[in-house]
């Protein structure tokens, strides 16, 4: 599966100039399965195999947002919303509101919630019947200045991934 999808992840990285991550839920965290790092000297740097909290990462928010409501509510009830940075959402009601806004947009965001000064966009994607998260991450100033175009590129890539067999 990773061999099939990597070219599309590389295209998204090239089109946006930002780091692209494919992740999957593993219990109460997200595990990074593939990372295509930006070529910019200032970038979000990540490693395959890293684990990130569901509540503070855009990958985690995308995966939470894609869950059936009952399953999400049960998981959120059991999650400890630990503060990772000063911007981390640590109140369940605020997280649920943030997830609802993401669902309405079609993509989820973190603004320095997992890594200070890093903003990221995440979207759920189904590949081979499994749920994954596709993420675009980079320095806050670059992500925010190109938010609409980056979100559109992310969603185009999600559609292409879901169509790829």
Image (cartoon, rainbow, N blue to C red):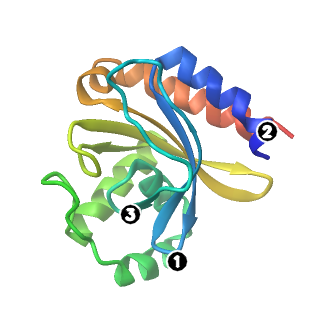
Earlier in the chain: of badge 2 and badge 1, it is 2
Q: Quick one: SS at disc 1? A: helix
Q: CA distance from mark 2 to mark 1?
A: 31 Å
Q: Which mark is residue 3?
A: 2
121 is higher (above) or lower (below) than 94: above
Looking at the picture, tell me which residue is in the foreground, 63 or 4.
4
**Residue beneath label 3, please?**
53
First reached walking from the N terminus: tag 2 or tag 3:
2
Q: Position of residue 23 (x, y in %)?
A: 56, 52
Give the CA distance from mark 1 to mark 3. Answer: 17 Å
Give the label, 2 or 1, closer to the camera.
2
Residue 157 at x, y = what percent? 63, 30
Secondary structure, mark 3, is: strand
To which quarter of the image does residue 89 belong?
bottom left
| Image coords of residue 10 (percent x, y) | 63, 25
Judge by depth and name the residue closer to the eye, 41 or 14.
41
Q: How busy is the neighbourhood of tag 1: few (under 14 within 10 Å), some, or many (20 plus)?
A: few
Residue 91, given in percent of the width and then of the height, sits at 20, 69
Q: 10 Å neighbourhood of mark 2: few (<14), some, or many (≥20)? A: few
């Amino acid at each position: 599966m990773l061999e099939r999808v990597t070219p599309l992840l590389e295209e998204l990285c090239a089109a946006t100039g930002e780091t692209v991550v494919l992740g999957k839920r593993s219990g109460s965290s997200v595990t990074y399965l593939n990372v295509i790092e930006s070529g910019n000297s200032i970038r979000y740097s990540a490693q395959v195999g890293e684990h990130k909290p569901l509540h503070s990462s855009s990958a985690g928010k995308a995966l939470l947002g894609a869950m059936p409501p009952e399953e999400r509510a049960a998981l959120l009830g059991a999650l400890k919303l630990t503060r990772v940075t000063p911007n981390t959402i640590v109140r369940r009601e605020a997280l649920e509101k943030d997830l609802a806004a993401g669902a309405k947009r079609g993509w989820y965001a973190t603004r320095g919630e997992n890594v200070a000064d890093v903003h990221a966009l995440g979207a759920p994607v189904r590949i081979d019947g499994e749920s994954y998260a596709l993420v675009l991450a980079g320095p806050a100033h670059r992500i925010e200045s190109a938010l609409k175009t980056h979100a559109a590129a992310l969603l185009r890539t999600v559609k292409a991934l879901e169509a790829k067999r």
